[in-house]
Amino acid sequence: MNIKILGPGCRNCVNLTKAATTAVRQLGLDATIEKVEDYAAIAGYGVMSTPALVINDKVVVSGRVPTLAEVRTLLSSAAV
């Protein structure tokens, strides 16, 4: 599984990265987490508001920090 956190490195981006990392660990998933801070790359996903969570090249959340439970649900759904 490929997970990307899109954002410039703000506090919300850091919080989303922590939530994603925790969810991956709790679920025991084989996943890589990549931080994307390049504005052109972020815009390439069609994201206008960060942070954004991308799972397997699909934007699943944008413009807010989802709860840990929500991240777990999104990752579980993508792992099936």
Image (tube, helix red, strand yellow):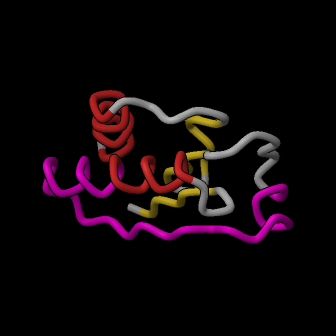
31 shown above or below 13: below
Could you tell whether 14 is left or right of 6 in the image? left
Looking at the image, the residue that sits furthest to the front is 11
36 shown above or below 48: below
**Front-most of 73 and 12?**
12
Q: Which residues are magenta?
A: 20-44
Query: Residue drawn 45% across and 31% down?
Result: 66
Q: In which quarter of the view is residue 42 placed?
A: bottom right
Residue 48 locus on image (x, y percent): 82, 42
30 shown above or below 17: below
9 shown above or below 80: below
Q: In which quarter of the view is residue 71 placed?
A: top left
Residue 29 locus on image (x, y percent): 21, 58
Q: Quadrant location of the N terminus?
A: bottom left
State yes or no: residue 46 in magenta: no
Query: Residue drawn 54% across and 57% down?
Result: 5
Q: Quadrant location of the C terminus?
A: top left
Tally of numbered tags:
0
Query: Residue drawn 25% across and 47% down?
Result: 23
Query: Residue drawn 75% across and 40% down?
Result: 49
Could you tell whether 20 is left or right of 39 in the image? left
Residue 15 locus on image (x, y percent): 42, 48
Could you tell whether 9 is left or right of 14 in the image? right
State yes or no: residue 27 in magenta: yes
